Amino acid sequence: MQLWILRHGRAEPFQDIDASRALVTSGRQEVRHMVTQQRHKMPAVSEVWVSPYVRARQTAAIAREALGGLSARCEQVSELLLPEARVSSLIEALYQSGLDSVLLVSHQPLVSTLLDVLCGPAEPHYMQTASLAAVELEVVAAGMGRLQWLEHP
């Protein structure tokens, strides 16, 4: 499986309801710039899995557009991508999916923890807003990933 992991762009300051925070203008720009810069390395995105939070959904829409107008039909909204979600549950769902490639759009701490679990924690994989990583997996399981690249805005 080819896996790309994208952290949402910069969002509004914390509010009473974290899930409703939207991207700010600079957050939209950093996501568009990051995905546009890396799209030549992402030719085979077949599905986008995204957190239900507003800022993640907005990030996924920008990414789909920057990747050449992927249809919204290829987007799956999943609570497995919430900030506090269990990495083991996400890995199991990816394994069960049978997909060849997927773009995940999520939050901290999930994105960095997922990279650590898949690729090994020897080097911490901190992701800033709009950071994008590529991981190759022959078998979708903990410790079986090979980090191809990790780019920060």
Image (cartoon, rainbow, N blue to C red):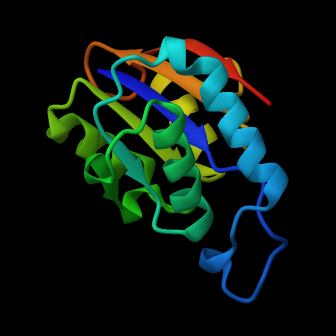
Q: Residue furthest bottom?
A: 16
Vertical position of residue 8 compared to residue 23: above or below:
above
- Going 67% across and 38% down the picture, which residue do you hit? 32
Left or right? Give the position of 132 relative to 28: left
Q: Is residue 106 visible?
A: no
The quadrant in which residue 112 appears is top right
Left or right? Give the position of 58 relative to 34: left
Q: Quadrant of the C terminus?
A: top right
Q: Quadrant of the N terminus?
A: top left
- Going 51% across and 20% down the picture, which residue do you hit? 134
Vertical position of residue 73 compared to residue 125: above or below:
below
Q: Is residue 115 visible?
A: yes
Q: Position of residue 16 (x, y in %)?
A: 74, 89
Vertical position of residue 107 compared to residue 44: above or below:
below
The quadrant in which residue 91 appears is top left
Q: Position of residue 44 (x, y in %)?
A: 33, 20
Vertical position of residue 102 compared to residue 19: above or below:
above
Q: Position of residue 48 (x, y in %)?
A: 37, 43
* The one of 146 and 12 positioned closer to us in this rendering: 12
Left or right? Give the position of 71 relative to 51: left
* The one of 70 and 130 positioned closer to us in this rendering: 70
- How many numbered marks are there? 0
Left or right? Give the position of 47 relative to 112: left
The quadrant in which residue 99 appears is top left
Q: Position of residue 18 (x, y in %)?
A: 67, 77
